Image (cartoon, rainbow, N blue to C red):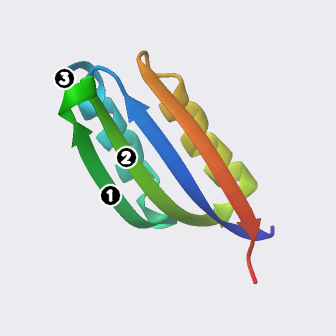
Amino acid sequence: MERRIGVIGIAVENREQSAARINQILSEYGALIVGRMGIPYREKNLSVIALIVDGSTDEIGALTGKIGNIRGVQVKTALVAKG
Protein backbone atom coordinates (compact mmCIF):
# COMPACT_ATOMS: atom_id res chain seq x y z
CA MET A 1 0.00 0.00 0.00
CA GLU A 2 1.30 3.45 -0.91
CA ARG A 3 2.24 5.60 2.04
CA ARG A 4 1.38 9.28 2.16
CA ILE A 5 2.63 12.23 4.18
CA GLY A 6 -0.02 14.60 5.44
CA VAL A 7 -1.12 17.31 7.80
CA ILE A 8 -4.17 16.86 10.00
CA GLY A 9 -5.80 19.88 11.63
CA ILE A 10 -8.06 19.21 14.61
CA ALA A 11 -10.26 21.90 16.20
CA VAL A 12 -11.65 21.02 19.63
CA GLU A 13 -14.53 23.10 20.99
CA ASN A 14 -14.86 21.54 24.45
CA ARG A 15 -11.48 20.29 25.58
CA GLU A 16 -12.68 19.07 28.97
CA GLN A 17 -15.18 16.67 27.38
CA SER A 18 -13.10 15.30 24.54
CA ALA A 19 -9.38 15.53 25.45
CA ALA A 20 -9.15 12.06 27.01
CA ARG A 21 -10.79 10.37 24.01
CA ILE A 22 -8.68 12.31 21.50
CA ASN A 23 -5.46 11.40 23.31
CA GLN A 24 -6.54 7.74 23.47
CA ILE A 25 -7.09 7.66 19.69
CA LEU A 26 -3.82 9.48 19.01
CA SER A 27 -2.02 6.91 21.15
CA GLU A 28 -3.63 4.06 19.18
CA TYR A 29 -2.30 5.59 15.95
CA GLY A 30 1.00 6.80 17.40
CA ALA A 31 3.02 4.87 14.81
CA LEU A 32 1.62 7.17 12.09
CA ILE A 33 2.35 10.43 13.90
CA VAL A 34 5.63 12.11 12.99
CA GLY A 35 4.95 15.34 14.90
CA ARG A 36 2.26 16.96 17.02
CA MET A 37 1.59 20.52 18.14
CA GLY A 38 -1.30 21.62 20.35
CA ILE A 39 -2.30 25.22 20.93
CA PRO A 40 -5.03 26.47 23.27
CA TYR A 41 -6.81 29.44 21.70
CA ARG A 42 -8.33 30.79 24.89
CA GLU A 43 -9.90 33.89 23.34
CA LYS A 44 -12.07 31.65 21.15
CA ASN A 45 -12.53 28.87 23.76
CA LEU A 46 -10.97 26.48 21.25
CA SER A 47 -7.99 24.15 21.14
CA VAL A 48 -6.15 23.36 17.92
CA ILE A 49 -3.98 20.30 17.29
CA ALA A 50 -1.78 19.97 14.21
CA LEU A 51 -0.40 16.53 13.30
CA ILE A 52 2.16 15.51 10.72
CA VAL A 53 1.43 11.92 9.69
CA ASP A 54 2.99 9.24 7.51
CA GLY A 55 0.80 6.26 6.59
CA SER A 56 -1.53 4.72 4.07
CA THR A 57 -4.71 6.53 3.10
CA ASP A 58 -6.68 3.81 4.90
CA GLU A 59 -4.73 4.26 8.14
CA ILE A 60 -4.95 8.04 8.03
CA GLY A 61 -8.65 7.85 7.16
CA ALA A 62 -9.33 5.55 10.10
CA LEU A 63 -7.55 7.96 12.44
CA THR A 64 -9.38 11.04 11.18
CA GLY A 65 -12.70 9.20 11.08
CA LYS A 66 -12.49 8.22 14.74
CA ILE A 67 -11.49 11.71 15.82
CA GLY A 68 -14.09 13.36 13.60
CA ASN A 69 -16.85 11.31 15.25
CA ILE A 70 -16.21 12.97 18.60
CA ARG A 71 -18.81 15.61 19.42
CA GLY A 72 -17.46 19.16 19.18
CA VAL A 73 -14.39 18.14 17.16
CA GLN A 74 -13.68 19.08 13.53
CA VAL A 75 -10.94 17.48 11.43
CA LYS A 76 -9.37 18.48 8.11
CA THR A 77 -6.65 16.57 6.27
CA ALA A 78 -4.23 17.42 3.47
CA LEU A 79 -2.22 14.54 1.96
CA VAL A 80 0.62 14.46 -0.55
CA ALA A 81 2.27 11.52 -2.28
CA LYS A 82 5.41 10.41 -0.55
CA GLY A 83 8.41 11.37 -2.64
Which amino acid is tagged 1?
A: Met
Mark 1: secondary structure: strand
Which image quadrant is residue 45 in? top left
Which amino acid is tagged 3?
A: Glu
Mark 2: secondary structure: strand
Residue 16's disc number: 3
**Which of pointers 2 and 1 lies earlier in the amino acid sequence?**
1
Residue 16 horizontal side relative to residue 70, left or right: left
Distance between the alpha carbons at the discs numbered 1 and 3: 18 Å
Q: Residue at x 35, y 41 (%)?
A: 48
Along the viewing direction, whichever of 77 and 28 lies nearer the viewer: 77
Residue 7 horizontal/vertical position (percent) = 56, 58
Q: Residue at x 80, y 70 (%)?
A: 2
> Does residue 58 sit above or below 71 in this rendering?
below
- In this view, the residue farthest toward the bottom is 83
Which amino acid is tagged 2?
A: Ile
Nearer the observer, disc 2 or disc 3?
2
Residue 38 horizontal side relative to residue 43, left or right: right
Residue 49's disc number: 2
Q: Quadrant of the C terminus?
A: bottom right
